[in-house]
């Protein structure tokens, strides 16, 4: 399927590993020019080189999305260097790894304020596009209440819920500008160096429980989440907005009305 992304301009935050990296790769493979950021210089350089090898006029810089002023300045500069902006993918998350108040602050600053600051900076550029789209990488943790023994899980789930609500509200306001806003909420996603690899090593019972609760009988891959994100970002999905798509292998065993 041609996603009609050739020549489009995209920004993806946190795109040097995991789901973000796969989103950037897929956008490049579809012919988009991609700007990426992360907090590690070597990772940014490596990823930009890879994306250019895939034919994308890719650019990248070191940015911490928790630093709102720096993030907004970078998005403005990136959109100018790309000569426009059609797609903004808000991907960065602190994850449920820090316990206590520090975990709450990390989630609020990266997951919520990072998403909001990024959108506020991206919107003036997206309004100039004929196919403007925003996609948030959220989590099923934002819509479920489940006993999980993981540090920072309350903060993580609460902040992802805030992102999902923000996206839904934003989608109504920017629709008049031709901008679509959607979320993708992954379930348990396994990749080398990722959180579920650590869970498999250090909390095998939690890993086995997740395997049993995913009705497909396995954990997901970052490529599968990236495919959903890029589809929602593409003009092919042009009549879809205000949605929160679960990519979770049936982990959320409910009827979604």
Image (cartoon, helix red, strand yellow):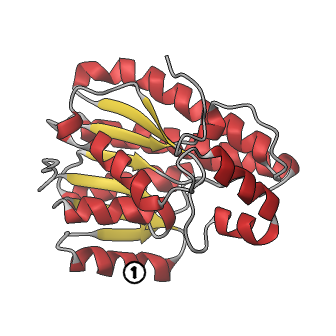
Specify whether residue 14 is in view: no
Dot 1: element: helix
Front-most of 71 and 247?
Answer: 247
| Residue 140 in which image quadrant | top right
Quadrant position of residue 211: bottom right
Residue placed at 33% from the left, 26% from the top? 241
Q: Is residue 255 above or below residue 127?
A: above
Residue shown at the point (85%, 46%) measured from the top left: 101
Tally of numbered tags = 1
Q: Is residue 15 left or right of residue 79?
A: right
Residue drawn at point x = 33 percent, y = 75 percent = 48
Position in image of residue 213 (x %, y %): 66, 44
The image position of residue 226, as x and y in percent, is 39, 54
Q: Identify which residue is drawn at 28% across, 45% down.
A: 231
43 relative position to 135: left or right: right
* Picture coordinates of residue 146, whole percent (x, y): 76, 36
Res 237 quadrant in image: top left
Q: Is residue 13 left or right of residue 235?
A: right
Q: Mark 1 packing: few (<14 Cα in 10 Å), some, or many (20+)? A: some
Q: Is residue 145 above or below residue 54?
A: above
Looking at the image, which is closer to me, 11 or 210? 210
Residue 125 is situated, as x and y percent measured from the top left of the image, at 26, 41
List the residue tagged with mark 1: 45
Query: In this rendering, does residue 256 appear at all?
Result: yes
């Amino acid at each position: 399927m041609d996603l009609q992304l050739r020549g489009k301009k995209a920004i993806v935050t946190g795109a040097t590993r995991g789901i973000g990296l796969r989103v950037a790769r897929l956008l490049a493979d579809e012919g988009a020019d991609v700007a990426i950021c992360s907090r590690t210089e070597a990772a940014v350089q490596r990823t930009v080189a890879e994306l250019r090898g895939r034919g994308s006029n890719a650019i990248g810089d070191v940015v911490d999305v928790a630093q709102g002023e720096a993030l907004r300045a970078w998005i403005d500069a990136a959109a100018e260097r790309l000569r426009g902006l059609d797609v903004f993918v808000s991907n960065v998350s602190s994850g449920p790894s820090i316990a206590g108040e520090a975990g709450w602050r990390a989630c609020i600053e990266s997951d919520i304020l990072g998403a909001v600051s990024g959108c506020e900076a991206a919107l003036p550029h997206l309004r100039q596009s004929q196919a403007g789209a925003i996609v948030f990488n959220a989590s099923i943790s934002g819509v479920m209440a489940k006993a999980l023994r993981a540090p920072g899980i309350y903060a993580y789930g609460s902040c992802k819920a805030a992102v999902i609500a923000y996206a839904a509200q934003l989608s109504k306001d920017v629709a008049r500008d031709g901008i679509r806003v959607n979320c993708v909420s992954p379930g348990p996603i396994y990749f080398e160096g990722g959180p579920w690899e650590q869970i498999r090593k250090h909390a095998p019972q939690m890993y086995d429980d997740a395997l049993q609760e995913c009705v497909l009988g396995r954990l997901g891959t970052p490529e599968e989440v990236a495919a959903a994100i890029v589809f929602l970002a593409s003009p092919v999905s042009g009549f879809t907005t205000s949605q929160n798509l679960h990519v979770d292998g049936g982990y959320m065993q409910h009827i979604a009305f």
